[in-house]
Image (spheres, helix red, strand yellow):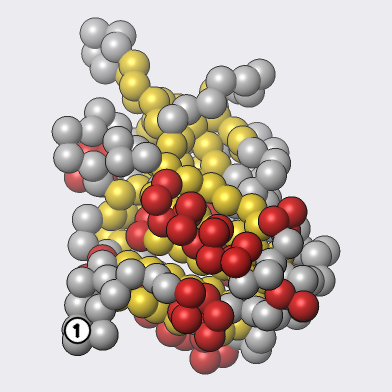
Amino acid sequence: MARAAVSGRLTWRVATLVDARAEGASARTLTFDVPDWPGHLAGQHVDVRLTADDGYTAQRSYSMSAPADGTHVEITVQSVADGEVSPYLVDVLTVGDAVELRGPIGGWFVWRPEQADPVLLVGGGSGVVPLMAMIRARRAAGNRSLFRLIYSVRTPADEYYAEELRRRARDDHGLDVTVIYTRHGESAHRITVADVNTHGWPPDLEPACFVCGPTGFVETVADILVALGHDPRRIRTERFGPTS
């Protein structure tokens, strides 16, 4: 997931690509080795900067898709047509190449391993990326909080982490995963009140709700959660626009 880059007193570090794999139809998961990386929380993001031979620079922000693991930082990048950064990261960058990376950034849309409340994750398209980091962080920490993920995506070919999510839904006790396809099969539809009511948590359990995706998707889901009786103070949102 990409967002407009956020300025701040953060240090640019050289990040070397050590692993890459295809993710869905037009995305790629990249693992970088970043010396002196300070660690991060699930839900945070990083700035990635590219510099051309003539000195021109372009940068974008990407959510991290995995919890802290020493000096490794993992992001999943969706290729955006006519983009300045994502096509290079998805189609050109090879193992051993380096980029500049700055972070971690963000302290609101985060899940901490010491939290014990039930968690509802609702992701639209590439908005599943920071939510996947939370699912992985839960398992890595041995946390036993109850997690439910509702993932809305166009087709099975566009789904990120498909095999891993199926495996985790089977093996990670306390994790439920529901995938809604918006353009595949006879039951294709956009997320509805019934979906959130059926596959989410009832508001009286006071779950922590994390919603991430395109602006329209996030606003729709947040409105549904409030209409169902969820406390707005327990709904955290992360959104991105059509140019991200």
Front one among 178 and 51: 178
| Residue on which disc 1 sits | 185
Is any part of residue 206 visible from this angle?
A: yes
Q: Which quadrant of the view contains residue 51?
A: top left
Residue lying at the far bottom in this picture: please name it.
Answer: 170
Residue at the farthest top position: 54
Tell me: residue 124, above or below residue 84.
Answer: below
* Residue at 48 percent of width and 52 percent of height: 219
Q: Left or right: where does residue 138 sit relative to residue 163?
A: right
Identify the image quadrant of residue 62.
top left
Image point 57% across, 51% down: which residue? 237
Q: Where, quadrant-wise, is the C terminus in this rendering?
A: top left
Asked which secondary structure carries label 1, the reply is loop
Residue at the location (69% across, 67% down)? Answer: 230
163 in relation to 67, above or below: below
Say whether residue 38 is left or right of residue 46: right
Under mark 1, the amino acid is Gly
Residue in the picture at 26% in, 17% down: 52
**Total residue callouts:** 1
**38 on left or right of 219:** right
